[in-house]
Amino acid sequence: MNRYEALANAMAREIRSGSIAAGSRMPSLRQIIAQHGVSQSTAFRAYYLLEEWGLVRARERSGYYVARGAKVPAEKAPPATPPAQSGSVDISDLVFSVLDAAKHPGIVPLGSAFPSPQLFPLPRLARSLARASRLVSPWSTVADLPPGNEQLRRQISLRYVGMGLSQPMEEIVVTNGALEALNLCLMAVTRPGDVVAVESPGFYAALQAIERLDLRAVEIPVDPASGLDLDALAAALQTHPVRACWFMTNFQNPTGATLSIEKKKALVELLAKHDVPLIEDDVYGELHFQPEYPLPALAFDKHGLVMHCSSFSKTLAPGYRIGWACAGRFTDKVQRLKLMTTLSASIPAQAGIADYLQYGGYDKHLRKLRASLQAQLREMEAAIARLLPRGVRVTHPAGGYFVWLELPEAIDAMQLHRLAIERGVSLAPGPIFSASHAFTNCVRLNFGHPWSQKVEHAIRTLGELLDHPSVRGADR
Amino acid sequence: MNRYEALANAMAREIRSGSIAAGSRMPSLRQIIAQHGVSQSTAFRAYYLLEEWGLVRARERSGYYVARGAKVPAEKAPPATPPAQSGSVDISDLVFSVLDAAKHPGIVPLGSAFPSPQLFPLPRLARSLARASRLVSPWSTVADLPPGNEQLRRQISLRYVGMGLSQPMEEIVVTNGALEALNLCLMAVTRPGDVVAVESPGFYAALQAIERLDLRAVEIPVDPASGLDLDALAAALQTHPVRACWFMTNFQNPTGATLSIEKKKALVELLAKHDVPLIEDDVYGELHFQPEYPLPALAFDKHGLVMHCSSFSKTLAPGYRIGWACAGRFTDKVQRLKLMTTLSASIPAQAGIADYLQYGGYDKHLRKLRASLQAQLREMEAAIARLLPRGVRVTHPAGGYFVWLELPEAIDAMQLHRLAIERGVSLAPGPIFSASHAFTNCVRLNFGHPWSQKVEHAIRTLGELLDHPSVRGADR
């Protein structure tokens, strides 16, 4: 172990034992240097590690403080009851430290949130973009202010028709990716201090949005196989003043779980009874391995309460940043928020995707993409069976490109993440998927990259690391 | 006068007299139909007009309510003292009704916020976009997450060097237009309930952001010739807990005023004394008619307190939605907010503009654009002198594409706006530029469109309307 790692581990033990209280200021770098006789670089790197582990937070020009939640015990949230209290969220530092670590070039991106861009028809899309940007009317700058490029909204509307749903193009707000759509929908239906129900484990961006907007989260357990626990949701709606839900109903991030049609219907009915809007994040829906698109909750909504958000970022054009919201009765409000915050999505990017949808062969591309992902899932499952220890449980998603691994209870996923990065492999550790940093023995793996010796080797590395003493919590 | 106008005027009188209290519910459409014996269409159009005048607000599925501020008397804010109280803001309904009205095709866009897209090298830019999107690495999706495309940030950094300023590319956050940059900067330094100093008259998006984020505005008077009143700002800093300022230092929207170098230095010093960050909106800076870019306040900042925001939307590529923030000591926070809310600006749009900046001849284009705007200003000034009544005062900006007209005191700019739209001319009425809907006798005109008989005729129309009885407040 390096000197800075030893120092960080020593400080981590002090924090975990509670001898430095949550919220209190850590010793200054200067104090650490004097006290432990280490170099400035060692002291700095030790704090960097502590920050990466979510144990301390840096405050600008003020030093390091023990993070709230740093003492959260390493145990899973109870599976079928909602947490007793809704709480404010403190997730971003952890997420950003993990994302930053995974960005380094050369890392095998098992922790990535995106599929491989090699799976996308980028040259064909570039031709559409080039043609559309030559042809687009200069005046569209003004005319295409929200709700966005008319041709694109028509094409999106037609895709809903393909699912048997009617979404008039007037009710489609084009956004900078689904992330903006989700954020605008959340803003449209909440005020600071409101309670929002989210999934646990769930997409960290929901937790970040809740943190940013001064909302409070109530976490609803997600079963890795059957998805959201509706009984827990019903109980939460009874005991908390829930103002909105943010759920992913198809190929949920991170578990890959999909709600059955019956559960989707029951969800919509339950929320209608309480008049609570549902922000439905459906960015993976098109990546189904079964023949049909699994209908979103939107399909069963009779009250305009479901805000259906999706994008082309996971299926066609990750960098174009084009998504949309069908926001039901909240459409006008979402449009206005869009106009106020970012005005409009990029006009040529919208026009380029519209052209591709009309002439580029999107459905053919999707069929190919789904087949690739399904084949990669088979490889991933085989490698996991072959190379990871027996105690590992893995989900079997019917679409998307994530599997969720439950490792033996003693495993510390944050430590595993750190050691894996050092060996050139990223993964998404469980604690970034909940406000309480639970799921300490879980990881999300991405199978959205073409299978290769390198990926195979990365799984083998994970298998080796699962035997590493510090990963097994030996130094706690 | 049409029947619906007569009905709207009658209801407006009741609202203005106070006989229907602010916040109370207006009669339903059904009641209006029964009471006045008018058709449904007439009743609806009357309410539409009242909404456009800012007198009523529609609430979803609940009818119309008398707007807060509907009874604001038609008098100008005192010129050199800050308002006694900071207030929450209620501007969006008014702004959106004006913007919507101006969007109709065929309208002469004197009220537009954009210059004519005909002045931009869009075909050349489309070639850059096509080339860049062919060449852009698929992996840039991940690598170009904030802070944005490296080549683009290098080009932006070089433009600062051209001004004699050093802005390392690491400190440049690329955004979806300057509007997002400004909003992210505001979020980075405020919390709900905080007080923010804005200009009066000033850019309505600042007021919308303050409304959206539950902030409070303190309005600092802007002199149409010399710009922001620094004495009033100093007084406001003494009397209000101001947490941030959002000012436009060059060719201010709507007055066109530019702060002198001395005033910019004094502004930066004053804010440093109070440790208050400045969000500097400098989107018009490149459109200077003098040989040199008028240095922004950023140039005099020694404490990282100035967040300099700009974009290519007013100078090159309105629809591409590419802007940036140099956010000083708040850079990390702004980057994180960007990552959380919209992830990244469109990758091909960023790459396309970067290619154009490097190879497309941006400086040559800017020289031509500035010359066009200056020539159009001369035409506009001549037409105003020739075709508008004597009592009209007009600013003489040294850049940008807005002039600010102070009309005779009796003129009602909202009525003028409404009648002008009916005759095919848009303008930006003074009340949309302040939280208190002041500047009732002022309008902003756009000279960013090539001069033509049609524009000339539009000015003539305004001259005629200034004699219209309802515009002169005769029906009050």
Image (spheres, coloured by chain):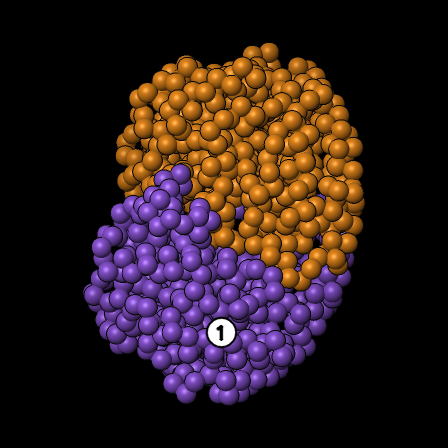
Chain colours: A orange, B purple
User: Which residue: 49% across, 41% down?
Assistant: A331
Residue A365 seen from this side: yes
Decide if residue B43 is on the left or right side of residue A248.
Answer: left
Q: Measured from the top left, where is residue A307 in percent x and y?
A: 50, 34
Residue lying at 39% horizontally and 22% vertically, measured from the top left: A273
* Amino acid type indicated by mark 1: Leu
For mark 1, give the secondary structure. Answer: strand
Chain to which mark 1 belongs:
B
Q: Give the image location of residue B117, x and y in percent.
A: 64, 67
| Location of residue A282 by image quarter | top right
Q: Quadrant of the C terminus of chain B?
A: bottom left
Residue B336 appears in the picture as rendered: no
Residue at the outermost top position: A390
Residue A274 percent across, percent down from the top left: 37, 24
Q: Is residue B449 left or right of residue A475?
A: right
Q: Residue at x 52, y 20 (%)?
A: A264
Residue bearing the label numbered 1? B445
Residue A385 lies, with reference to residue A333, above or below; the image says above
User: Residue at 57% across / 84% down in the picture?
Assistant: B379
Whether residue B237 sits left or right of residue B164 in the image: it is left
